[in-house]
Image (tube, grey):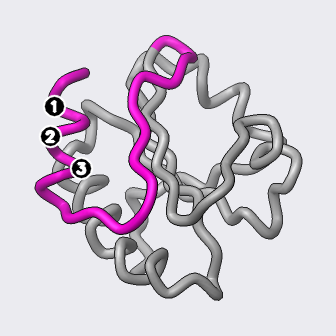
Amino acid sequence: MPSDDLLEITDKNFDTLLKEPLPILIDFTAAWCPPCRAIAPHVAAIARDYAGRVAVGKCDTDSNTDLVARLDVRAMPTLLLFKGGQVVESVVGLAQKEDLKKVIDKHV
């Protein structure tokens, strides 16, 4: 489920986005991945619910292989929460919206 609230994270813009003051949650996903499609509505809802407090983006793993390798993303979906340019939380696999909110709430 696409959302205007979601940033598109790429090999090229990742480092710039990390410099932003807000924490950023990145969903590493692929179009062919059923669990990725299942979690997409939860990620979109998180983007809406946390607008102005947390930036939320999606990274297509097939198109951004340099970033995937750099961050050692090995499974999908993988969600990484960055704060101050560092990974502070990670969620691997299908998670519910409430589980994601608990992870985020520790850092906002």
Q: Is residue 33 magenta?
A: no
Q: Which residue is mark 2?
A: 102
Residue 105: give its label. Answer: 1
What x and y, as percent, mark residue 37?
45, 82
Amino acid residing under circle 1: Asp
| Magenta span | 84-108
The amino acid type of the residue labelled 3 equals Leu
Q: Is residue 101 magenta?
A: yes
Nearer the N terminus, badge 1 or badge 3? Answer: 3
Closest to the observer: 95 or 11? Answer: 95
Image coordinates for residue 11, horizontal then vertical, percent: 81, 45
Residue type at numbered disc 2: Lys
Secondary structure beneath dot 1 equals helix
Mark 2 vs 3: CB contact within 8 A? yes
10 Å crowding of disc 3: few (<14), some (14-19), many (20+):
some
Callout 3: SS = helix
Front residue (pair 89, 60)? 89
Q: CA distance from mark 1 to mark 2?
A: 5 Å
How many numbered discs? 3
**Mark on residue 100?**
3
